[in-house]
Amino acid sequence: MVKVAILHEGNANKTNDNELLKLLLKDLGCDESRVEFFGFGSKSNFFKVDNVKYEILKLQIEEEAISKILFVVDADYECHDNKCGGSKKTKLALENVIKDLYLSKISDIYVTCDPRTNDGYLESLILSTIPNKQKKCIENFLHCSNFKSKENHKSILNEIYKKAYPNAPYDFTHENFDELKEKLKNLLEEG
């Protein structure tokens, strides 16, 4: 069976990025067994054309085991990374890598962020989909808790969300998930 590839941050096992993608595939009724997940670790690894993950991916493409690719990468913040921070710069940098790897014809990109600001990460996208009252409560908690580390902030935001919504962890009907859902459908479309 020819598969498709999703390249994302974290590892290919259970990480926040991978978990969200798998839940969304299930929600869409897509066959997850057709997807090969490639966890790239940190965002910076996507911009290294000599990354061993790209070598593995290209070999599978040559063997016709993989037909399409979706890159799913956090925007992060432009103020923290002038070269690849923010949605536009992340997308442009990824397009250049994809072009250098000769993967343009079979690749698509989804940059995770808060759609209103075009900054942030997966957790920012998730936070953008919850009702304002709950969002304000989480933001107030994070503000008064004085968490300094970006990684702690992301982890704590994700844990707060999971605790607050244990039975329905994500509102996939929210319009902020529409673009990602469309890209996943296109990725798994036959032909």
Image (spheres, rainbow, N blue to C red):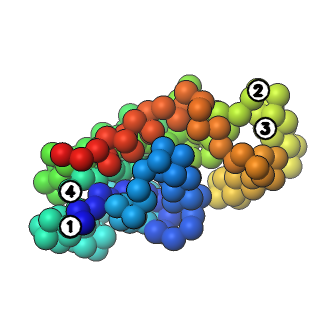
Q: Is residue 98 among what the camera can see?
A: no
Q: Is residue 140 left or right of residue 26?
A: right
Q: Earlier in the sequence, mark 4 or mark 2?
A: 4
Image depth: mark 4 or mark 2 in front: 4
Q: Earlier in the sequence, mark 3 or mark 4?
A: 4
Specify the label residue 132 is tagged with: 2
Q: CA distance from mark 3 to mark 1?
A: 44 Å
Q: For the point 56% across and 67% down, which residue is it?
A: 14
Q: Residue at x 72, y 46 (%)?
A: 168
Real-space Cα separation, disc 1 to disc 4, in angstroms: 7 Å
Mark on residue 139? 3
Question: Which residue type carries mark 1?
Answer: Ala
Q: In whole angstroms, how far apart are the C-alphas of marks 3 and 4?
A: 41 Å
Viewer-nearest of labels 1 and 2? Answer: 1
Quarter of the image that includes the N terminus: bottom left
The span from disc 4 to disc 2 (Cα, nearest Å) is: 40 Å
Q: Position of residue 102 (x, y in %)?
A: 13, 54
Q: Residue at x 65, y 33 (%)?
A: 129
Numbered mark located on residue 140 in the image? none
Q: Tell me if mark 1 has few (under 14), some (14-19) or many (20+) residues whose alpha carbon lies within 10 angstroms of its own.
A: some
